[in-house]
Image (cartoon, rainbow, N blue to C red):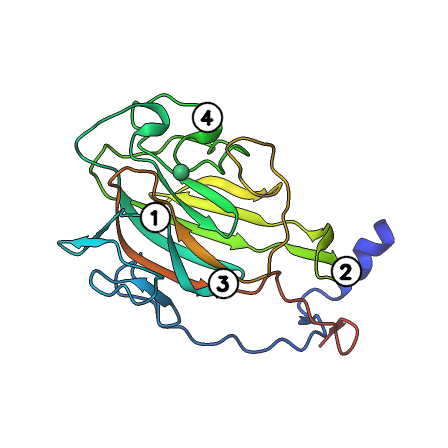
Amino acid sequence: MIALLGLTAAFAGSDWKSGIPWKKPFVVTPAEKVGNPPSDAVILFDGKDMSAWDHEWVIENGDLVVGKKDLFTKQKFGSVQLHLEFATPAEVKGSGQGRGNSGVFFGNYEVQILDSYENETYPDGQCASIYKQTPPLVNVCRKPGEWQTYDIVYNCPELNIEKDESGKVQSVQVLRPAYITVFQNGVLVVNHHEIKGSTFYNRPPAYEPHEAKVPIKLQDHGNKTRFRNIWVREIPDVNPMPQPVKAAYYE
Ligand code: MG
């Protein structure tokens, strides 16, 4: 170890190269205001246009209000960064899971939206939980009716789906689970959490077969939660790690 340290010291001041032929990152223009979409975002809701979605919910004063049936994006997405803003109803009605309940789903995996401001429910079902898989690290909810932000990183799973000759699924093997990270109102509340499967209400999580790319869904749970400023950026499923073209070296 002493000899190794001596060797390292001999190169101090030299420029170490990894030997990996990294591509130059694309230039993305950030929004003037943090939280607004950067230049490479796919806009899902901008206050007036619902063309990204499979049907319409009511728009009131530029806010998208939860309407009939779950809302699905027409476009399918794999791994993404998603930004959305939501406000649970200012007029507090109901309790527990019945207060301001909605949710954002990446296919089968729900990040809960709920009024969890002085509203008790089971921790793994409160706002910013991965529904019935983990509570958020902290409760950073604003008051009912106040706007809140979610910034979510979703890494899609890699599934090996075996089918028989008729196309019936025989088995689902999880080659790489999904992971979700959530910032709520700028605070980290879910840290690269491993997803155990679909987020069911009435049974344990389990992976079900699905394509890598899936619609993003906003949930109709019967409460008039509002949304605005929804956008996504498509990201690699895993961090790219090209092979070095030559061994690491000093220059
Ligand atoms: Mg929900």
Q: Quadrant of the C terminus?
A: bottom right
Give the label, 1 or 2, closer to the camera: 1
Q: CA distance from mark 2 to mark 4?
A: 50 Å
User: Which callout, 3 or 1, points at the residue further toward the start of the chain?
Assistant: 1
Q: Is 2 in front, or is 138? A: 138
Q: Is 152 in front, or is 109? A: 109
Mark 4 element type = helix
User: Tags 3 and 1 in contact by the CB under 8 Å rule?
Assistant: no
Quadrant location, ligand no. 1:
top left
Regarding residue 167, the answer to whether it shows in the image is: yes
User: Tags 3 and 4 in contact by the CB under 8 Å rule?
Assistant: no
- Which of the numbered marks, if any, corresponds to residue 8? 2
Q: CA distance from mark 3 to mark 1?
A: 20 Å
- Which of the numbered marks, if any, corresponds to residue 123? 4
Q: Amino acid at mark 4?
A: Pro
Q: CA distance from mark 3 to mark 2?
A: 45 Å
Q: CA distance from mark 1 to mark 2?
A: 63 Å
Would you call the spot at circle 1 few (<14 residues within 10 Å), some (14-19), or many (20 or more)?
A: some
Q: Which residue is mark 3?
A: 77
Q: Amino acid at mark 3?
A: Phe
Give the label, 3 or 2, closer to the camera: 3
Give the label, 3 or 4, closer to the camera: 3
User: Which callout, 1 or 2, points at the residue further toward the start of the chain?
Assistant: 2
Q: In this rendering, is residue 214 above or below 99?
A: below
> Disc 3 beta carbon < 8 A from ligand 1?
no
The image quarter in which residue 22 lies:
bottom right
Mark 1 element type = loop
Give the residue at x 53% y 60%. Answer: 79
- Which of the numbered marks, if any, corresponds to residue 201? none
User: Which callout, 2 or 4, points at the residue further toward the start of the chain?
Assistant: 2
